[in-house]
Image (cartoon, rainbow, N blue to C red):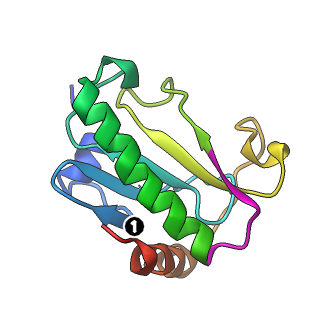
Amino acid sequence: MPTIFSKIINGEIPAYKVAENDNFLAFLDIFPLSKGHTLVIPKNETDYIFDMESEEYANLWKFTHKIAIAQKKVIDCQRIGVAVIGLEVAHAHIHLVPINGVEDINFSREKLSFTKEEFEEVAQLISTSVLL
């Protein structure tokens, strides 16, 4: 059964895209923990990240690395935190969360709210800094 992420990949649901290639997509989380919180997904629908083929898994992390570098350039933060939880959507995905302390990546915290324009601005800032 297609996931919400598959629907984003297929253009059935809009997203604030940060970067995309033939195999992977990065877009802003619409329920972010911080400004610039980005999700990175494989376009191949796989539920559990560790069920991915080794080459695809390695390439997902290479793509993710480029996104994190771009985030760090344009978002005021100490680090880009990484989380792979995999329970909330049955489609492998990596959270890249700009953080200034460990408490910033606590998923039980209240999520932030941004306007459409703010999401678009952040997506554009990150997107222009990604070197694919």
* Figure check: 1 above or below 82: above
Q: Quadrant of residue 48?
A: top left
Q: Position of residue 113 (x, y in %)?
A: 66, 63
Residue at (20, 48) in percent of width and height = 23
Q: Position of residue 101 (x, y in %)?
A: 84, 50
Name the side, left or right, on which 80 lies relative to 109.
left
Q: Position of residue 8 (x, y in %)?
A: 28, 51
* Figure check: 59 above or below 92: below
- Quadrant location of the N terminus in the rendered image: top left
- What segment is highlighted magenta in the picture? 74-81
- Quadrant location of the C terminus in the rendered image: bottom left
Q: Amino acid at mark 1?
A: Val
In the rendered structure, does residue 89 fall within the stretch colored magenta?
no
| Front one among 18 and 69 | 69
How dense is the environment of label 1, judged by Cα within 10 Å: few (below 14), some, or many (20 and up)?
A: many
Name the side, left or right, on which 24 lies relative to 26.
left
* Figure check: 32 above or below 82: below
Residue at (52, 64) in percent of width and height = 69
Number of numbered discs: 1
User: Circle 1 is placed at which residue position?
Assistant: 18
For mark 1, give the secondary structure.
strand
Name the side, left or right, on which 114 lies relative to 54.
right
Q: Position of residue 6 (x, y in %)?
A: 24, 42
Q: Quadrant of residue 80?
A: bottom right
* Figure check: 100 above or below 23: below
